[in-house]
Image: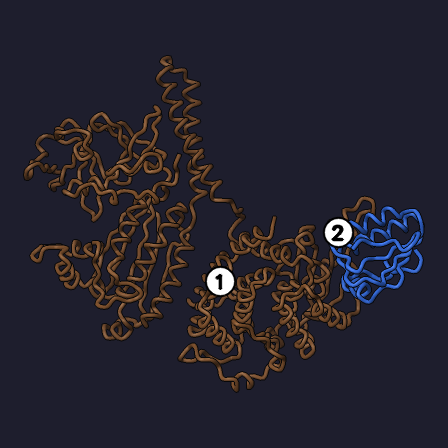
Chain colours: A blue, B brown
Amino acid sequence: MAAKKAGPGSLKLSAVLDLNEASVLHGKLMSMRGSDLVIDASGVERVGVQCAQVLVAGVMAWKEDKKSFLVEKASDAFQKTMQLIGIDTDNLIAKEI
Amino acid sequence: MDMNEIKEIFFQECEEQLAELESGLLKLNDGDRDPETVNAVFRAVHSIKGGAGAFGLDDLVSFAHVFETTLDCVRSGKLEPGQDVLKVMLKSADVLADLVSASRDGGSVDESRTRGLVKELEALANGELPSASGHEAPKPAAKAASAAPQEETPKPTDESGFQPIPFSFDGFDDEEPVFEGSIYEVTFKPRRELYSKGNEAALLLRDLSRIGEMSIACDMDELPALDKMDPEASYFSWKISLKTNKGEDDIRTVFEFAEWDCDLEVKLAEEASTDEELPMIPVPFDLSILDDASAAEEEDKAVEPSAVEETAAAAVSAAKVATGIVKAADAAARVAEKKDAASSAAAAAQNNAAAAAAAAGQTIRVDLDRVDRLINLVGELVINQAMLSQSVIENDTNGTSSINMGLEELQQLTREIQDSVMAIRAQPVKPVFQRMSRIVREVADMVGKQIRLVTEGENTEVDKTVIDKLAEPLTHMIRNAVDHGIETPEKREAAGKNPEGTVKLSAKHRSGRILIELQDDGAGINRERVRQKAIDNDLIAADANLSDDEIDNLIFMPGFSTADKISDISGRGVGMDVVKRSIQALGGRISISSRPGHGSTFTMSLPLTLAVLDGMVVTVAGQTLVVPLTAIVETLQPEASAIHSFGANQRLISIRNSFCPLVDVGRILNFRAIQANPVDGVALLVESEGGGQRALMVDAIQGQRQVVIKSLEANYTHVPGIAAATILGDGRVALILDVDAVVAASRGQSLKPEMALKPEMSLAATG
């Protein structure tokens, strides 16, 4: 279930972003800091709040680093859950931050 | 924690839930219409179902499901919980308890009974009142007539006759018209535990969104920087504005399983408007999210079969009734959504246990062995402390006051520790009493009587060992009271009584003992018949002149039964003598009083604990003995003029113008061959069974102290006339006198082993 690297500076999210995935995702993001990043959320089927927390923290970290953090190809499930838990999609799925 | 442990916890919690369920139902039966009582009952069944689903206990799930559905009708006010309805519910609670124990210990349950009840419950849920015959199945036509939309879905029927039952959503709209379109402000802040127990805030929010129109604002203020965050902690919280026609309870129900792991506030928006902190960002909602989610759940391979059925039912209803699928989907989603279904359910069950515990103060679950070990150690400590102070007193002739003061403090502390430790083992008699209500119901049903069990003082606490041993004799007596004590409704009416008989079970503390009374308002003991029976059975001589009290006490004789016909329930000629023996084995006494036409009362007096005892230390023929203080009425120094000879070697002592047989303890226990002179010793006036008094003669009184009971059987062998042993401060072993056995022996009966404590009944604290 680990997130796979889809190339330099890009990260493909796992299908199930649950409690177990939160730490994995956190680790991945930590290791990718300092460069622009493209997140591929096309394969996401389920998102837990804890992964959402990590992603939002990621957005803020990248913003601080003045690098781009781009979420591409968000799946329906990803978008709908984010919407459900009240995360303004502009915060996360922003074009350029 | 492996699966079996989790399962064991689940079953322990089932026990609690079942107790909750039964007491709730009984409250309803007594006319309590508090919605919280109904909710508690519903929750109990719901939690059992939830946990059982995770362990694949399909029989349990299916029955609990049907039960829950019917309870939901009561909860929503569709079904009035009248006597007839509650009768079915109480029976269902019994079956649920049977199913739980069958799931735990193996074995089977009465299938036909379960199926019959499922049908009755379904009938109730469909708005039919229980038929007179009880077990008759509702006609298919009647079911079709009720025409719930779910009726058209295929109904997988398994062996237990389980059919998914439609939830009564139609009743929801007019359920609480007061809240029509109210806006609630919900603040939801999950804690870390919520996630670690396998709950998911997103799912709770999704469930919430199904209740009504929701707009949500996520508060991210607490989210730390990426490098400082703990990915498994909880930082987000939500402010939700929910427009719904449901009540606050329905909103809280969504968070039912997570309630203890989050901060939750639900209030009407009008009240909330003053302290608005967060700007509300309304998020538009399309319900297609929900449909997707249900569809995904349906496809989930890990789902329990029953959960699939539920989900299917929920999905159908979701299509028909877009809102209000909260409960069905809630349960299904819960099972389906988690990869580790078991841990989530266990967590859910834990939450509920926490809920139950919080209501009754904080508790922890401790293995009984550990408590027993602690009690044993404290017993040793008490003995050690006594030995220490004795040796200090013996050696320290100067009487250094600081040492003595320290010792006194130590003594007080040990006494306090001992009391506190004993209190750990003390438990309310409630579970035993609750079991009795089931026995009353079942036996009354069998013999066709109407009987109400009234309990009083269920929270009276007594040592766990006593509670465990109490169930059996109580069961016997309750059966007797129902079978023999209470008359048939016709006879009662003829006698001008309420056709419904009452059996009252009460417990209270009385001078360091627990007093349990079982009272029935039946016909009382038919003394003429008892007497005749005793004569027939050669228990008494035909011309014996017996007082009423003595006749009443004949029923405790072995082999005595007055039942004309031997029934399944009682009347096999074993019973009251066994009851008496078990009560005696617990160091208790039992007595009976009866008023013809008004009923009988059995009174049992039991020690609060079997581990320590307040005793009077006495000397008899150079031996040190301990006489239980509870048995002693008074002590006196006999004067020569008060002693009268009677018969060959009997003596009486006259105390305040009445005569009381004098019992020479040293002689009875064979400590000495010749009778001692009463004037040289002390007489202990004791109360023996049956209320008679005897004067036990001992040589001298050494003092009064609390002793730790050590089983003689476990460490040596049974000694007639001796109940147990203890270790005194000087390290010597002293024997604890079995007063009743000694008194019985003085009446010419030999000291039979069964008169004293039986080995397995012997005392809790064995060294």
Residue to which mark 1 is pinned: B21
- In the depicted structure, whether residue B686 falls above or below residue B162: above
**Residue B643, image x, y percentages:** 9, 34
The answer to whether the residue labelled 2 contacts the one labelled 1, judged by CB atoms less than 8 Å apart, is: no
Image quadrant containing the C terminus of chain B: top left
Name the secondary structure under disc 1. helix
Residue to which mark 2 is pinned: B235
Residue at the location (40% across, 63% down)?
B438
| Subunit ID for the residue under disc 2 | B
- The amino acid sitting under disc 2 is Tyr
Residue at the location (37% across, 12% down)?
B398
Left or right of B2, for residue B615: left
Residue at the location (28% across, 40% down)?
B630
Q: Name the residue furthest top.
A: B398
Which class describes the residues within 10 Å of circle 2: few (<14), some (14-19), or many (20+)?
many
Q: B176 or B237, which lies in front?
A: B237
Q: B762 or B226, which lies in front?
A: B762
